[in-house]
Image (cartoon, rainbow, N blue to C red):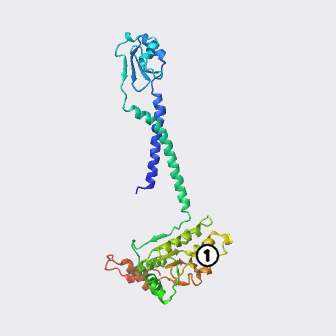
Amino acid sequence: MPDSKWLRSGAVWLVLVVAVVAVWLLFVGRENSPPARTLGTVAADIRDGRVERLTQPVDSQDVTVSYERAVGLPDAVTTLPADTDIFSALQEYGVDLASLPAEMIVIEPASPWGAWLGALTFLLPTLFLIGIFVFMMRQAQGSNNQAMSFGKSRARLFTANKPSVTFADVAGVDEAKEELVEVVEFLKYPDKFAALGARIPRGVLLVGPPGTGKTLLSRAVAGEAGVPFFSISGSEFVEMFVGVGASRVRDLFDQAKRSAPCIVFVDEIDAVGRQRGAGLGGSHDEREQTLNQILVEMDGFDSSTNVIVIAATNRPDVLDPALLRPGRFDRQVILDRPDIQGRKAILDVHARGKPMEESVSIDNLARQTPG
């Protein structure tokens, strides 16, 4: 499919070319046209022997008048009356046709390009106006599409078709991986848990300092389970326009339910999940409306909704208590900075499959790396 941006630029260039040609035909062509003379003046010049040739196309009433070189006048044009041939017109003005040389009056056959040039002279301005109209309609349609998509979710979707991350790619957080194995099992075998009446937490909150692998671990859960992974930042929900954040939340969870089983990952949830009542806008604050919609969507999960929400934050103390109550993010997984063994495991993952100098010691690198 051609690039729409290239098509738009091509349409603009087409409109410009049509405009230039139309201006040239309408103005420049007129400036270069020969001067006009009345039929009476031409007849008088013929009687005085000043005219060398009269040339008339068979499909036109315009006659080109060529003067004798000694006269020194440029070629001129005279127009015959409608439904009148050149011979009758000259006779009416007293010209004796019998005294004229036979080659003086030349009737040219119709030019194959004459009709096309005449049509182009009429069509080019019309095409120019149509091109401007189409261009404006496309611009307006693009603006409408942007307005219609303003409330759509901006979540990025990772599916099994893309290179996936698994627990083998995550190191240094063994305790966190063990706690999330249950989530992987539920996504893989939901019927087994439903048959036993087990309840899996709908929300998992990953808590830890920046750089401890919260996002990587959540992607590893989706990779181990082989399910789609929706990733979005908390700040991407909130806009200056009221209602946009709530609309994006609804759209995100609608997509997730259609793709179930799947994982929805909200990074930096504290950007939208801060305790309510602290904003300047009170209950009408856009951030609080977005948070309310998240709470409503998570309450709407039933036992057959195989959607798990994983959120990450490094500020659990500022989160709204309603987010942490049972049925929402009631399970918290702590990710601490790795100790020396964890750092060694992380270095082993990154060094896997890469040629290493024999003098390089992973243990020494792990001790030198701050944890």
Residue 311 in the image: x percent, y percent?
53, 77
Residue 253 in the image: x percent, y percent?
53, 73
> Which residue is the site of mark 1?
274
Residue 152 visible (yes or no)? yes
Q: Is residue 345 left or right of residue 312?
A: left
Residue nearest the viewer, comparing 219 with 160:
160
At 59% from the left edge and 76% from the top edge, which residue is drawn? 296
Q: Quadrant of residue 346?
A: bottom left
Q: Quadrant of the N terminus?
A: bottom left
- Element under disc 1: loop
At 34% from the left edge and 16% from the top edge, which residue is drawn? 103
At 43% from the left edge and 33% from the top edge, which residue is drawn? 118
Q: Is residue 84 above or below residue 125?
A: above
Residue nearest the viewer, comparing 176 with 209:
176
Q: Is residue 208 left or right of residue 112?
A: right
Residue 72 in the image: x percent, y percent?
42, 16
Q: Is residue 141 above or below residue 243?
A: above
At 53% from the left edge and 58% from the top edge, which residue is drawn? 145
Residue 238 visible (yes or no)? no
Residue nearest the viewer, comparing 147 with 314:
147
- The three-letter code of the residue at mark 1 reads Arg
